[in-house]
Amino acid sequence: MDVDTIPSHEALIKLQTIVTRSRDALSGYSIIVDEAEPEIRAVAQSLRGLHENHVAELSGMLRGFGVTPDLNGSLMPTVNDTMISLQALVGDVDADALERMYESEVEVLKSFDEALEEMMGFPQCHAICAMRHDLAQLLKHSKGSE
């Protein structure tokens, strides 16, 4: 692979950050999908599906650059997962749980922005931009329909 076609180490870290934050989001959505009210469940299913697709596509990009993606996520969702699990025990997974997940999506969007800055000029930038757009649109649409 030509050196000019390999992003900087910093750019690769930024791509991995999107994968990590998306995996974190997936963790919370799994609980919401299983336990939430139907209208909230539908939003969580859409977001979960989008993140699954993004993780797969970004992982493929990283592999294409010779990097093995870390698919474990971070420890950050542990508190949110615990809160959602406690709510599920009392049958109360509602809009508050989804609002906490929306707050975590802000971090995912920021990680897309940071990666886009580093990936300017690379062909993959268009796909990353499209993923960010899809997430932003889904969040806008789902928040508007609550």
Image: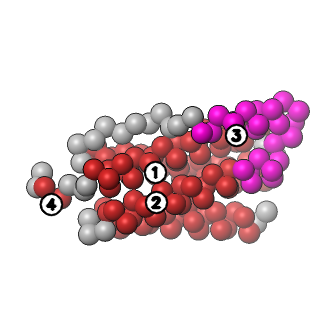
**Is 95 within the magenta?**
yes
In the rendered image, the residue lying farthest to the left is 2
Q: Which mark is residue 80?
A: 3
Magenta stretch encompasses residue 80: yes
Verify CB contact (< 8 Å) between mark 2 and mark 1.
yes
- Secondary structure beneath dot 2 equals helix
Label 1 vs 3, first from the N-terminus: 1
Q: Is residue 145 above or below residue 39?
A: below
The alpha-carbon separation of the residues under discs 2 and 1 comes to 6 Å
Crowding at mark 1 (Cα within 10 Å: few <14, some 14-19, many 20+): many
Q: Quadrant of residue 28?
A: top right
Can you identify the residue that label 2 sits on?
A: 112
Measured in 3D between alpha carbons, the distance from the residue under mark 4 to the one under mark 1, in whole angstroms, is 23 Å
Say what secondary structure mark 1 lies in: helix
Magenta span of residues:
76-100
Residue 49 pos. (x, y %):
56, 49
Q: Where is residue 34? Give x, y as percent.
A: 72, 37
Q: Earlier in the sequence, mark 4 or mark 3?
A: 4
Quadrant in which the C terminus appears? bottom right
Judged from the image, the secondary structure of the residue bearing numbered disc 4 is helix
Which of the two discs, 2 and 1, labels the residue nearer the N terminus?
1
Label 1 near label 4: C-beta < 8 Å? no
What is the spatial separation of the Cα atoms under label 2 and label 4, in whole angstroms? 22 Å
In the displayed structure, would residue 70 be above or below residue 107? above
User: Which color scheme is applied?
Assistant: secondary structure
Q: Regarding mark 3 in the picture, which secondary structure is present there?
A: helix
Residue at 52% x, 64% y: name it.
134
Q: Which residue does the numbered mark 1 point to in the structure image?
A: 18
The residue lying furthest to the top in this view is: 89
Amino acid on which the number 2 mark rests in the picture: Phe
Q: Would residue 131 be seen by someone viewing this image from the given angle?
A: no
